[in-house]
Image (cartoon, rainbow, N blue to C red):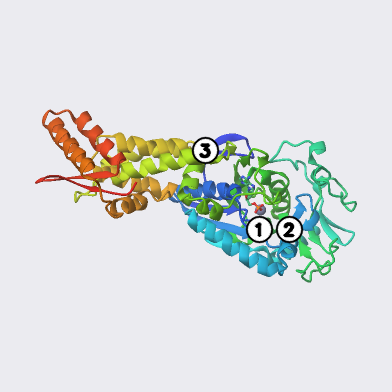
Amino acid sequence: MKIFNTQTRTIEEFVPNEAGRVKMYTCGPTVYHFAHIGNLRSYIEEDVLEKYLRKHYEVTRVMNITDVGHLSSDADTGEDKMLKGAKREKKSVMEIAKFYTDAFFSDCRELNIKKPDIVVPATKSIGSIIKMITGLIDGGYAYLAGGNVYFDTSRLDNYYVLSNNEAEDLEVGVREGVDEDSNKRNKTDFVLWFTKSKFEDQELKWNSPWGLGYPGWHIECSAICISNLGERVDIHCGGVDNIFPHHTNEIAQSEAYLGHKWCNYWFHVHHLNTPTGKMSKSSGEFLTVSLLKEKGYDPMVYRFFCLLSHYRKSLAFSYEALDNAKAAYEKLISKIASLEKGSCEADREKVSILTAPFYKAMDNDLNTSLAITAIYDVLKSSASDADKLSAIAEIDDVLSLNLLKAAEEKRNSKETSIDSDFAEWIGKMISERAQAKIDKDFARADSIREMLSEKGVMLTDTREGTTYTVVEK
Ligand code: AMP
Ligand code: ZN
């Protein structure tokens, strides 16, 4: 399997540290608001990556939940986002965290995103965070200033391993209109532990060797990753906005602490954009899965919409584009519903020939749109319906588009009453198809079946002749 590695900026063969096992880490959500469909684009792609890796390896996947320390600016200034959420809703930070963590996993369930094996909130990892900061201070990589603990980026030979940013580009705080922190020795230094919150009502604080305080956002991911997956992780994921400063800082502090290379592959999903730019929670204007459902979209249509494009391309959201995906998804389900479940067993060898193009597409840097084309090719092939259904089931283990379930529902949906003209026309088409088969004009026979299926007429060939059911379209 080949995958693009942000760190080397090349597509590389994926080779885990330990044969047959993959350790995977994902930056989880900051739970101060609902996840928007942009955040969920990242989690859908990461879910596909995990499920595809599971086809070949035993995978352990860890995700953090950011419930403290993520300030309004990624450069450690501004208000804690959690506090902002609590104020907005006049609730406590922990109430907000619980509510939006549950909401996040409920959205994930709607979108068939598997819950990672281990999910750890930052507030439950304070011990490992303090241990790591202590190690960094002991190693001379961190310093105390103005009551806070900072990572000293000047101690590293190459801080910008992940991003080719220039120092001038890195004034994140200034760019976002928030004050720069005068305690920092270098512009790129970042906070590991805050004791001097600029906000008196910061609710969550813990005792530490440096005083009562709370951790910075970056250290939580390194500490949660190392304490749950050990000193070496194979692949680390997030959206592209995480590359700098979050993942850059994670590498800096983890490798300084461990004294060796920490993570081999960095997987970043490009953004879902709206006409005004990146969809973001802080803008306050974003779309959620519930909103899409209210508007009548099956969450699977959104998953399908995401998988139709490549994770390394930004994706422009519009209802028009979503409607196109919806029409294509429904057509695909109708086609699958017209396959006969029958009693014959699938032939393993034939199924593996049918699924080969899917694996080839996925092996090539997770090309999900080509993987979807592989489903259409399965449907078009001359294989038996049993082989086709088995191949589609195998592909959908990874894509998780509910293909068979939705097709089954379509088949089972109650028969619609039809008028006599329609019934007469169906009868005529069935006779024409029977004649086409006698004439060995199988292309014509298939096209009649397809045309009927598109109108919701599902044919079943029996020894006594062809019967049909009409399902709701
Ligand atoms: P957050 O909850 O803000 O910490 O973000 C959760 C995940 O969503 C992170 O991996 C982000 O990189 C990712 N993300 C944020 N905005 C977008 C977007 N518009 N499109 C895709 N991914 C995003
Ligand atoms: Zn993270």
Cα distance, mark 3 to mark 1?
Answer: 26 Å
Q: How many C-alpha atoms fall within 10 Å of the one at disc 3: few (<14), some, or many (≥20)?
A: few
Q: Position of residue 242 (x, y in %)?
A: 67, 46
- Nearer to us: label 3 or label 1: 3
Q: Which residue, as the protein is rendered here, is positioned at the far front?
A: 420
Displayed quadrant of residue 154: top right
Tell which residue pokes out farthest to the left in this image: 464
Residue at (60, 47) in percent of width and height: 38
Left or right of 466, for residue 215: right
Q: Which residue is mark 1?
A: 33
Question: Hey, what amino acid is under mark 1?
Answer: His
Mark sitting earlier along the chain (1/2):
1
Q: What's under tag 3, amino acid-wise? A: Ala
Q: Earlier in the sequence, mark 3 or mark 1?
A: 1
Q: Position of residue 39 (x, y in %)?
A: 60, 49
Which label sits on residue 81? 2
- Which residue is the site of mark 3? 321
Nearer the observer, 421 or 38: 421
Tell me: residue 227, above or below residue 394.
below
**Residue 347 visible:** no
Image: 321 above or below 237? above
User: Based on the displayed image, in which of its 4 quarters is residue 222 positioned?
Assistant: bottom right
Q: CA distance from mark 1 to mark 2?
A: 9 Å
